Image (tube, grey):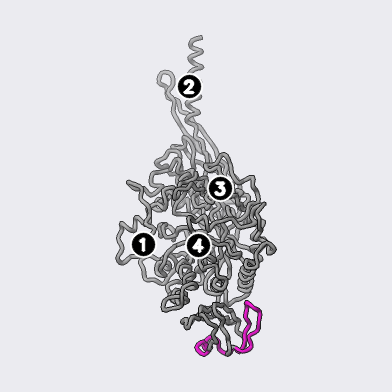
Amino acid sequence: MKNLLLGIHCLLLFAVFAQAQNPTIKRIDPTNWWVGMKNPNLQLLVYGDNIKGSQVAINYGGVTINRVIEVENPNYLFIDVTIGTEAKAGKFDIELTKTFYLKGKKNLITEQTAKTTFPYELHVRDQKPQEINSKDFIYLILPDRFSNADPSNDKFSDMADTASDRNNPFLRHGGDLQGIINHLDYIKDLGVTTLWLNPVIENNQPQTNEGGAMRSAYHGYGFTDHYNVDKRLGGNVAYKKLIEAAHAKGLKVIQDAVYNHVGINHWILKDVPMKDWLHQWATYTNTSYRDEPVVDFVHGNTSDFKVQQNGWFVPFLPDLNHDNPFVATYLMQHALWTCEYFGVDGWRVDTYQYNDLEFMNRLNRALLEEYPKMFITGENSVHSVVSQAYYTRNTINAPFKSNLPSPNDFVLFHAVAPALTEGFDWGKGFNRLYSTLAEDMLYEEPLLNMTFLDNHDENRFFSMVGENMNRYKQGIGFLLTTRGVPQLYYGTEVLMKNFKNPSDAEVRRDFPGGWVGDAKNKFLASDRTEQENEAFNFVKKMANYRKSSSALQTGKLTQYLPQNGIYVYFRHDEQQNIMVIMSQSDNAQTLSLKRFAENIGTATHGKDILTDKTISDLNNLIVPSGSIQVIELMK
């Protein structure tokens, strides 16, 4: 009996030991892939328990394992595979087999094996991103603050931040993707062609203390799981639904990408594959937020360069190390996965200047190889045209050459509000616009610069121009007639206002009418004030005219030196010739057209696009004080 009990005990110990040795796969990223990609190579990040030392097998036609890589953390494997041209869409198992040895009676060694499988799937490519270029008009939406269609997903008890409170400007307010879907007709009616959403990827972040107030990550810039859309917005299903609904209405969608950092609560950071997954410093080091150390290839130093590039953006957004090839591949593959899985049409890259620029060239190249006309625009909040051009395709003779197709045009943005509000003088007023555009020779293709008047990080435009309707119309008119890809921030069309005082939450207020019970619904003309309707209709008029204007979309820009408070420029091509006149003079003036003869040519009359009135005599053109005129010239 004693021997029997001992035998049972040994068997139980063996069973427990064997179970402890069994490999277990918890997740694989990317979550799936596609056949027919131009790049046949794929690197699978495998995370689980007891997977170190496993033999990996995939028994599926056309899929070949090239290499299995073990790293510092035994809970990770990286599997390099090739998906050949003969591979078909379908399901298969990724199999891990692990051998271990047990010492039994009389020190007899017994070889044992344990096996686990994980399902994987290859799909057929069916996404064809639509081209976004200077023919488009982009509408920026902060999803949490636009419209709440489903209050049941406002908060979840199993997330790090369980709060949702519209009375608190720093917390989540409940806006979701279905709310955007519900207002696509409003957006299209405005004349918009493209949506840009602040990040929708999961931000399962705890509240953080910023400036003495606890704040939620409602803005979306702290990713915690690249392969899941935040369920408070509706999750992957809702995002797919939004993109399909937008496409059905002829609208395109830009995704906001963050490559520089992740949220402090990212699932990978809870058990990092290797120490250098992040940029490491002996003591916490913040980025300097200065672009000059990167651009200054003549006089710069490596210390300042390293701090700008590798310093953390803020303490709760850990900085990714793009020199680590596994990190780089993980981010590049996620971008490709997003294009195919969701069907996005373009990318806006957050904090572009803080990323390793060689890495960004590789990532852009990977996207453009699969989608040659993909629109990619990068955020660089800089103040000089040289810096802005340096980070995009340019004509600068520099040792580094960026392949970014488009910059967010911060330099032109910084010029607009002062140009409209300060007095006309040498280097001031409209001269700011003229001087900024005069440096366009530094860009390879300035038509792709994404132009804007405000966004989620800046003061509201209507407030910046002193809530003056003439200046507001000049700004909107300039945005929609100058060169570039224009972008409008949600609510600017109905005169949403405020400065970033005391915080940026003031410029991220809820769109009135996006929540049941709102006192006013600004999606409806009947609930807008007379002035708000005037603003909405002005945007709508200009934007919808632009849709059919080849000159405003892709025509050449010819500008004339501002004189006497009047700025004149032309957009023209073989089909169309449009003259734009803006005045910041205190008095009405009769404009002599002689100095514009080379652009007016043989035109004898024109149509005022904003009033629909015919101008029968161009020689007696009256320019009212504080006005903008958009005139289609005719022979």
Q: CA distance from mark 2 to mark 4?
A: 67 Å
Marks 3 and 2 close (CB-CB < 8 Å): no
Is residue 451 something that shows in the picture? no
Q: Which residue is mark 4?
A: 459
Mark 2 packing: few (<14 Cα in 10 Å), some, or many (20+)? few
- Mark nearer the N terminus (3 vs 1): 3
- Specify the amino acid type for callout 3: Asn
Q: CA distance from mark 4 to mark 3?
A: 31 Å
Q: Which residues are magenta?
A: 593-617
- Specify the amino acid type for callout 4: Asn
- Give me the disc on residue 13: 2
Where does the C terminus fall, quadrant-wise? bottom right
- Horizontal relation, residue 158 to residue 102: left or right: right
Marks 4 and 3 close (CB-CB < 8 Å): no
- Horizontal relation, residue 228 to residue 386: left or right: right
Q: Quadrant of residue 518?
A: bottom right
Q: Nearer the viewer, mark 2 or mark 1?
A: 1
Element assignment for label 3: strand
Mark 4 packing: few (<14 Cα in 10 Å), some, or many (20+)? many
Q: Quadrant of residue 180?
A: bottom right
Q: Nearer the viewer, mark 3 or mark 2?
A: 3
Element assignment for label 1: helix
Closer to us: 210 or 372:
210
